[in-house]
Amino acid sequence: MTPRTPDIHITVLGSGTSSGVPTIGCTCEVCLSTDPRDKRLRPSILLQYEGRNVVVDTTPDFRQQVLRAGIGRLDAILYTHAHADHILGLDDVRPFNFRQRESIPVYGTEDTLAALQRVFCYAFDEKIESMVPKLDLRRMDETPFELFGVEFIPIRLLHGKGTVYGFRFGAAAYLTDHSEIPPASMALLQGLDVLFLDALRHRPHPTHTTLERAVELVEEIQPNRAFFTHMCHDLHHARTEATLPPHVRLAYDGLEIDVEASA
């Protein structure tokens, strides 16, 4: 008998944009909201399967996110791109290094890994004797790769004039920080159960998708369920969600869902 492919348990660690919600100094309705779903840390997810913990991006809120989610070990990091709101929490992997006594695999494109080596140069300086992040950098391109028995497919996205990557894993895909999904990438998103999509706000933005365009993309891709993420303080959770189709919801910090690890 063929063994059953394990489920992947997804936890949304952060569903906000680069400045988070509440935004510093802002007194708008959403920033002052008492609804916990309107409190959005920077964007990241946690994938748990087969006793492994994998995170996509280490935001500036990474320590807070890890503590809140109760993550006791970290087995790998996947990077979508090297913008500050996606990488600046990397130093906080040090306690995992200390407890696990091993380097943590880090997957990213050549440009992303080069940026990590610049920003966290001390982590790669053999002359530094103090506790620094121990990282095993692994270059990825658009070729699928296996991680602890699950295939990950990098999905190329346009972020304004730049290129970033989302990931498909089994019956789910996580796409953040995109203004356009190229046709070749759309072809990789068929047959999804769960789709996470960038949906910054209503007003157009040069490097992000609007809520309205995200709804159109859901109609084109036709996943069973869709969750919008990377949202700014323009979107009030309850009122915005009430306008969406039943199978389309706003993600929120702490959201947990399960998906099949095979498509």
Image: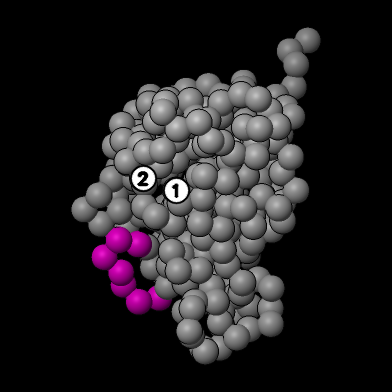
Kind of residue at badge 1: Ile
Main secondary structure along the magenta-highlighted residues: loop
On screen, 135 above or below 182? above
Outermost residue, left direction? 161
Looking at the rendered structure, the secondary structure element under dot 2 is: helix
Considering depth in this image, is 72 or 207 the residue closer to the camera? 72
Where's residue 95, x and y in %?
A: 65, 39
Disc number at residue 119? 2
Where's residue 180, x and y in %?
A: 31, 53
Considering depth in this image, is 119 or 24 the residue closer to the camera? 119
Q: Is residue 142 visible?
A: no
Range shown magenta? 202-208
To which residue does mark 1 refer? Answer: 87
Kind of residue at badge 2: Val
How many numbered markers are drawn?
2
10 left or right of 60 in image: right
Q: Residue at x 39, y 68 (%)?
A: 210
Q: Residues within 10 Å of mark 1 (few under 14, many from 20)?
A: many
Q: Is residue 66 visible?
A: yes
Q: Residues within 10 Å of mark 2 (few under 14, many from 20)?
A: some
119 left or right of 131 in image: left
Q: Residue at x 56, y 58 (%)?
A: 61
Q: Are marks 2 and 1 in contact (CB under 8 Å)?
A: yes
